[in-house]
Amino acid sequence: MLMEEMKELKNSVLGTKDEKATFDMEAICAEVIDREKRSKNIIIYNVTENIDMGSSQRLTEDKQQVIQILNQITEINPNELIISRIGNVQKNKNETSTSRNGGPPRERPIKVTFPNSEQALFILRNKKVKSPMTYV
């Protein structure tokens, strides 16, 4: 009887280890996939945003500004890019989105997604942008 209970406990412990190993492997795979997706992105800061425009007009203007910035680094195909602002639009410049030093509100950063990570990495390695206030 005691031997049977020991075998059952041993089997349950081994089963728990297998479940934990499976969970760890799933978490690792999810992390690798997430990093692969993020490796195609760059973030551009300090690009002016006209909040008085509609969202589609802002997106068009953002895309033009991003293309202008990236073309200073290399020729790109604008149709391959996915461009979006990060954060919420601050309709009123007096809202809580001020800079850390109490200055004027910050512009929302722009996330640019490339078709592959090589293009994003090339941009980051060669990011000597002519505008000193724009950060890639």
Image: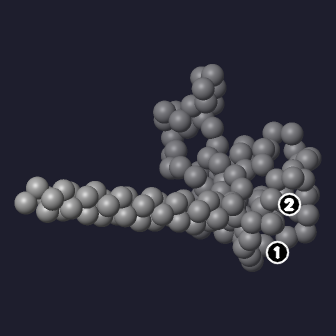
Q: Point out the tag, 2 or 1, that comes first from the N-terminus.
A: 1
- In the picture provided, is 127 more to the left or to the right than 107? right
Q: Are marks 2 and 1 in contact (CB under 8 Å)?
A: no
What percent of the width, then of the height, locates residue 56? 59, 67
Q: Is residue 100 above or below residue 124?
A: above
Q: Nearer the viewer, residue 52 or 120?
A: 120
- In the picture provided, is 40 more to the left or to the right than 129? left
Q: Secondary structure at mark 2?
A: helix
Q: Nearer the viewer, residue 97 or 123?
A: 123
Q: Which residue is mark 1?
A: 77
Q: Secondary structure at mark 1?
A: loop
Q: Residue furthest left?
A: 1
Using the numbered discs, state the Cα–Cα distance from disc 2 to disc 1 in whole angstroms.
14 Å
Q: Residue at x 82, y 53 (%)?
A: 124
Please state which amino acid type lies under the numbered disc 2.
Answer: Phe
- Quarter of the image for residue 7 reads bottom left
Please state which amino acid type lies under the numbered disc 1.
Answer: Asn
Q: Residues within 10 Å of mark 1 (few under 14, many from 20)?
A: few
What percent of the width, then of the height, locates residue 20? 37, 58
Q: Which residue is mark 2?
A: 122
